[in-house]
Image: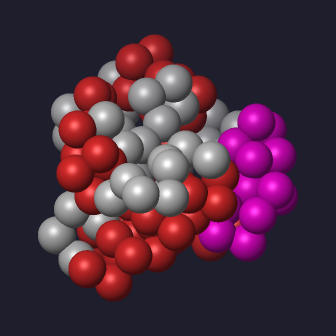
Amino acid sequence: MVAACGLNCDTCEIRLAPFDQGAAATVLNWFKRQGWLDENEGMPEVLKRKMFCTGCLGNRETHWSTDCWILACCEDQHGLNKCSECPDFPCDRLVEWSEQDTSYEEALANLRKLNRATQ
């Protein structure tokens, strides 16, 4: 399962948290460090507030980043499932995004592989 941006959803702890105790522990600790959860809050609050993700093709109410610019461009504006399907792939904005973090670099590499596979 690959997101519109190329991130690997299969290993994403935010997606796995509702049904994987290890991922839940990691996510809960991170949310608490960010100040998004109080120290005494746990998975019931995460589930109630929909602080998890079902992937780009899932329900937008349970998408980690409901205002994701990549998802808005790819799916909403162009009607595509992945950026690699776009005739403008890779656009400058996606390349700039990929330079912000190693996981984003890996995501762009995933999209490049998908793009080559369809040509």
The C terminus - image quarter: bottom left
Q: Residue 15, image x and y in percent?
A: 31, 60
Please report the bounds of the magenta region as a residue range.
Answer: 92-104
Is 87 above or below relative to 76? below
- Residue found at x 76% / y 36%: 93
Residue ID at (76%, 64%) = 101
Q: Position of residue 80 (x, y in %)?
A: 36, 32
* In-image side of 55 versus 107 (left or right): left
Q: Please give the name of the residue rendered at 74% of the width and 56% of the height, measured from the top-left corner.
A: 98
Task: Tell me which residue sits at (34%, 71%) in the image.
Answer: 24
State left or right for residue 66 relative to residue 45.
right
Res. 117 in view: no
Residue 5 coordinates in the image, percent (x, y): 52, 49
63 relative to 84, above or below: above
Q: Residue furthest top?
A: 77
Main structural element of the magenta stretch: helix, strand or loop? Answer: helix
Image height of 67 relative to 13, above or below = above
* Towards the viewer: 54 or 41: 41
Q: Nearer the viewer, residue 119 or 6?
A: 6
From this view, report whether residue 25 is shown above or below residue 65.
below
Residue that extends furthest to the left in the rendered view of this protein: 19
Q: Where on the picture, by quarter, is residue 94?
A: top right
| Horizontal side of residue 106 vs 21, given as left or right | right
Magenta span has 94? yes
Whether residue 41 appears in magenta in the rendering, the answer is: no
